Image (cartoon, rainbow, N blue to C red):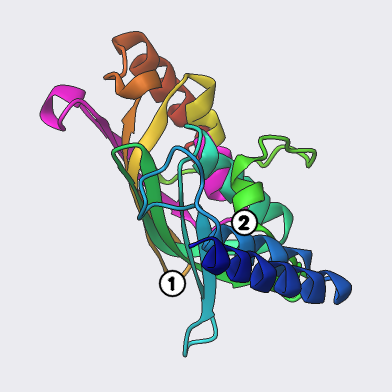
Amino acid sequence: MAGGLHRHLSTLLIHITFQARKGQIGDVMAYINSKVPNPGFHADATDGFEVSRNPSGTFNLSIRGRFQPDWLGNLSSGLSRNRINIISGTARKIRFSWEASLEIMPDRFATDLKNIDFITVARDGVDTGPAVQITLEAFSLGRPELNGGALYMEIKARDQLGFLGALLNSLAFYALFPERMIIETEQGRISDRFWIKGIGGAAPSDAAINSLRLKLEGFLVK
């Protein structure tokens, strides 16, 4: 067993050294995340991500791990800073870990996807960019008692770079975080659905819901 572990670590170090010499730090982190278990996780649950190209020319980002409640906002804002738009996707919390699959599309000024460590982006809550101003065409909120203790929110809007990150940051201001979301963009129109809870998975309070409602009303196109 010791010999097998030694060979595994040797292979890992060779790969890291080779990628580091090429300057592909994102590839190094992705490789480590895919090969080294995160302490405290179940054996089959590790942090990691994969990026693949779709036939349509967009990309699919699959990411998994145990993240803090605001990780989706961090990831969305980070993608926006790197000029990458989220077209569609799903994310869901399963026990203590998250799994998400996002269809993304970089614009021509975007950071090369090979140079982005998406795990770090999801964990980095620092946003040095200017605040993104978003607008909504419509929204609706469903009571937690009718949705398994989660506040159901449905959003309609025109497509806007940075929209999802700005929206999720608005939720986080009221200590509200999605435990599941479905993102869809078609013909320049956003149609997103969220199931939202408070800290520790608690049902959102009436005060938080009312504050969020007022915030969303302020985003509506006049």
Q: Is residue 90 left or right of residue 171?
A: left
List x then y, in percent, for residue 18. 80, 76
Farthest-out residue, left: 146
Mark 1 residue crowding within 10 angstroms, few (<14) / some (14–19) / many (20+) = few
The residue at which mark 2 appears reads as 118
The residue at the point 51 percent across, 33 percent down is: 68
Q: Is residue 168 above or below residue 198?
A: below
Q: Is residue 193 visible?
A: no
Q: Is residue 158 visible?
A: yes
For this rendering, which residue is in front, 110 or 93?
93
User: Which region is colored magenta?
Assistant: 139-168
Q: Secondary structure at mark 1?
A: loop
Q: Quadrant of residue 97?
A: top left
Q: Quick one: label 1 or label 2, which is nearer the N terminus?
A: 2
Q: Identify the amino acid type marked 2.
A: Phe
For this rendering, which residue is in front, 15 or 102?
15
